[in-house]
Amino acid sequence: MALGFVSFNERMEVLEKNDLGLVTEAFSKKDLDVIIPKVAKVVARLAGNDELFRYGGGSYYQKFKKAGSGAVVGALFLTQSKKAIRFNWEATIQKESSSAITSIDVWSKDEWNLGYPKPTVSFHTDDMNIVQICKIAAKLLKKPDVRTVVLDESFLSEGKRNLASVEQVINYLNSKNIKLNAVRNADLSTFVKDVGMDWPPSIRSMKAGRGIFNLSNVGNLGSGPAELAIVIPPQEQHPTHTHVVSATAAARKIPVETLFTDLLDLSTLVAKKVRPSLLVTGGAGTGKTYTVMQSIAKAGLKEKEDYLVVKGKTSTFGLYETLFLYHDKLVIFDDCDDVFSNGDSRNILKAALDSYDKRVIGWNSKITMNTSGMSDTEKEAYDASLRQAILSGSWSSGDKDAQKMPSEFEFKGGVIFISNIQKDKMEQAIISRSLTIDVTLSRDEMFERIELIMDDINPGDGSADKTMKVEVLEYLKEASDAGDMGYPSMRTFVAGLEVRMSGLPRWKELLKYTGG
């Protein structure tokens, strides 16, 4: 018999009071702020009263990427026993999910830190209700080293509903003309709603993917328990924290010493084509990029029309193609240090950074067109035709009939290369070819910058007050003075503040993992 309607708050009150309760309706993302704190409370109790402290404060969510599910938001909790657990909401999975919580990540004792290590284990919960999620989360938190979880009747709804047989589920799906090789979570949820019975846990052993079950060959599959494997997750991708970006940008607006004035002037020389190239080296988070872009703006240059910014990983041929396409404009390479690890890339960069009146960049290969025998007029016509095709989107390097990149071209633009590599680690042949400036701030200078702008740094749920910020900054200074921490940065402070905001008593112990 189908159950009557139970309000969301009533369901959560029952869950919190009895550790477990009956939750049948699907949740949505808007429920997260209500669900997460109560689920954490229940999980902590089931895990042996291992108190959970929310990272970043009461309503803060991490944003990151997981392989196979794309963008994720997660509520991370640190435990008194030095473990960590995170409840996730995955946008692409949520469409077919039975719960707002689509996966759980757990870190074993001492394994979580602010360097974003991958979880010890993960478990997909998109086909489970809140009762099952709480039980599994508690089990994993107590024993993060388990590799399987057995789902039986005790993981269902405490006997409040009868358990259907596999045959009953199959008959229902057939009656609805649902393809048995692609049964969705939503189909099984509809079965529960229409029939008033839970589908047996053994069906979970027939999972074909996230939210999909293949029941076309169930054979003699019984209605007993299912043994599900724990996922060993890949490394996650975490973006630069938005508050690190804004705080760093704010810090860079603070009047700086002569070193930054020199950087501004040198960048302006390249922006105005007085000099062909500039190499900027030094540690991360010191203001290199901000100062360079400030000079570009003052010079009146417009992005794409006058200059291009290239960030992150760049292949050797990608470097060649970029310089060809923007042969008469300013190209700014920001944090593309991987090009220095490849000899061919270094040679291309040397040619672009050179101070000669005529800079010719070459690539002799089967994938390029030998244009060395062409006249200057023929070369210009060939190059212009190819650039037009690339910019219009009609050209593809994978098309065998497409016009090939030229084996050489004249580079008339400017290059500014911004690198986190220290100057003394840079190849001398690179340094000697262009203007070069090393931008490095001392420890005290960085702390001074943080102190000047920390009123505007409000990460997590924004609840950190001035006293808390000063407390974190002073501890970072003490740890640095004692040799327990390396070079500080904006990220060090923001990450440390978020840990402090969790309320975890041992927050200072975790700051040694901030990367500073």
Image: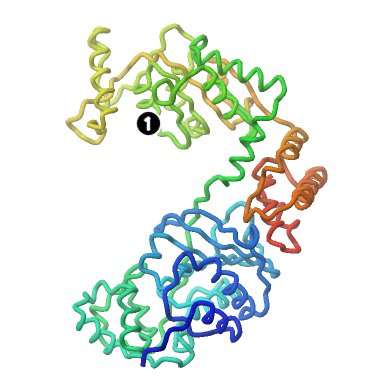
- Residue highlighted by disc 1: 318
Q: Quadrant of the C terminus?
A: top right
Display coloring:
rainbow
Q: Is residue 160 above or below residue 381?
A: below
Q: Is residue 77 above or below residue 411?
A: below
Q: Is residue 414 above or below residue 446?
A: above
Q: Residues within 10 Å of mark 1 (few under 14, many from 20)?
A: few
* Depth check, front residue: 98 or 68: 98
Q: Quadrant of the N terminus?
A: bottom left
The residue shown at (54%, 79%) is 12
Image coordinates for residue 131, horizontal then vertical, percent: 50, 81
The residue shown at (62%, 78%) is 47
- 366 vs 119, left or right, is left
Image coordinates for residue 221, horizontal then vertical, percent: 31, 86
* Depth check, front residue: 381 or 461: 461
Q: Is residue 266 above or below residue 312?
A: above
- 142 vs 170, left or right, is right
* Res. 40 image quadrant: bottom right
* Depth check, front residue: 269 or 327: 269
Amino acid found under the numbered disc labelled 1: Gly
- 478 vs 365, left or right, is right
Asked which secondary structure carries label 1, the reply is helix
The residue shown at (40%, 25%) is 304
- 38 vs 65, left or right, is right
* Res. 129 image quadrant: bottom left
Image coordinates for residue 471, horizontal then vertical, percent: 79, 51
